[in-house]
Image: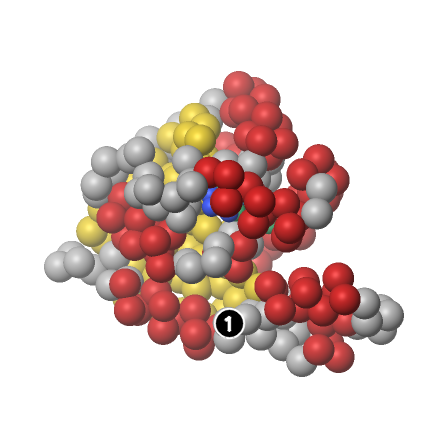
């Protein structure tokens, strides 16, 4: 059972200010859920997602995926999982508007969701925020039905020069570099593979600053 205080302390050190970070995530969500996202979705997710299927978005933040997803799939059931209070407030407000359910839970431990319920699980820019990402991946696999799709999208390792992009190197920026750039795309594929997913494709994004991994839960997992 994860300790909620230590999760929020860890997140506050990374987000710096919960409200500012909530606003940043709202301002930047169109970039994450743009043409490339929907191209990957079309190829790997749409074929396994029935019109009234269930999508679980782990670390949903303020719910940036909800409205564009509702537009593409008017009847799909959407569940967002989140723990950070400012994100939860925004996600809950949006959930009323677009028809989604918010589950307050800590991805460092077991989720209050049944086995094999979801057709699709997404985890967008959240894995790097966990001190140990394996429970998140195990829970993604557990709640997904066999044959269901898992889309992982996150920061990946890159040269410091590319990460700073001309900004002055401060202790804060270097700390963010450590937090964002721990795993390579291949490391993420290894982690997914290791818990039991089959990785179908790894897609580099924005000059390989990020990677999207399209995975499936094999029938025997
Ligand atoms: C960078 S934000 C991305 C939000 C959203 N996926 C998006 O792309 O707009 C990562 C989110 O994961 C959430 N998160 C991080 N660690 C978590 C944990 N242990 N349990 C639940 N949510 C967590 C954060 O609170 C934050 O809202």
Q: Is residue 55 visible in the rendered structure shown here?
A: yes
Q: Residue at x 28, y 69 (%)?
A: 194
Please state if 154 lies on the left or on the right of 47 as rendered. right
Which image quadrant is residue 162 in?
bottom right
Choose top left, top right, bottom left or bottom right for residue 97: top right
Front in this rendered view, residue 58 or 175: 175
Above or below residue 94? Residue 115 is: below
Q: Residue at x 42, y 41 (%)?
A: 3
**Residue appearing at x 77%, y 71% in the figure:** 164
Examine the rendered structure and indicate whether residue 189 appears above or below residue 124.
below
Considering every residue shown, the one lying at the far left of the view is 220
The crowding category of the residue bearing disc 1, from other C-alpha atoms within 10 Å (few below 14, some 14 to 19, many at least 20), is some
Residue drawn 63% across the image and 32% down it: 86
Between 22 and 7, the one nearer to me in the picture: 7
The percent position of residue 160, horizontal first and vertical second, equals 71, 78
Q: Is residue 134 above or below residue 121?
A: below
* Residue named by callout 1: 183
Residue 32 location (% of width, % of height):
61, 52
Q: Quadrant of the C terminus?
A: bottom left
Colour setup of the view: secondary structure
* Rendered location of residue 103, percent (x, y): 42, 30
Q: Is residue 77 left or right of residue 131?
A: left
Q: Secondary structure at mark 1?
A: loop
Q: How many numbered discs, if any?
A: 1
User: Which image quadrant shows ligand 1?
Assistant: top right
Q: Residue 105, percent across and down?
A: 41, 35
Q: Is residue 160 above or below residue 7?
A: below
Q: Is label 1 within 8 A of ligand 1 (CB to nearest ligand atom)?
A: no
């Amino acid at each position: 059972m994860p300790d909620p205080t230590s999760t929020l302390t860890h997140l506050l050190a990374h987000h710096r200010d919960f409200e500012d970070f909530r606003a940043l995530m709202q301002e930047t969500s169109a970039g994450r859920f743009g043409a490339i996202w929907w191209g990957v979705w079309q190829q790997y997710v749409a074929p396994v997602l029935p019109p009234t299927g269930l999508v679980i978005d782990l670390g949903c933040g303020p719910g940036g995926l909800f409205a564009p997803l509702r537009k593409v799939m008017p009847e799909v059931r959407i569940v967002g999982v989140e723990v950070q209070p400012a994100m939860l407030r925004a996600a809950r407000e949006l959930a009323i508007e677009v028809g989604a359910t918010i589950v307050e839970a800590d991805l460092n431990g077991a989720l209050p969701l049944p086995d094999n319920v979801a057709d699709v699980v997404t985890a967008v820019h959240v894995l790097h925020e966990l001190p140990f990402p394996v429970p998140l991946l195990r829970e993604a696999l557990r709640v997904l039905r066999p044959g269901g799709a898992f889309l992982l999208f996150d920061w990946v390792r890159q040269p410091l020069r590319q990460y700073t992009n001309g900004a002055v190197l401060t202790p804060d920026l270097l700390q963010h570099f450590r937090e964002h750039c721990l795993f390579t795309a291949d490391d993420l594929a290894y982690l997914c593979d290791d818990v039991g997913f089959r990785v179908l494709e790894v897609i580099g994004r924005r000059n390989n600053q990020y990677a999207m991994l399209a995975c499936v839960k094999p029938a025997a997992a």
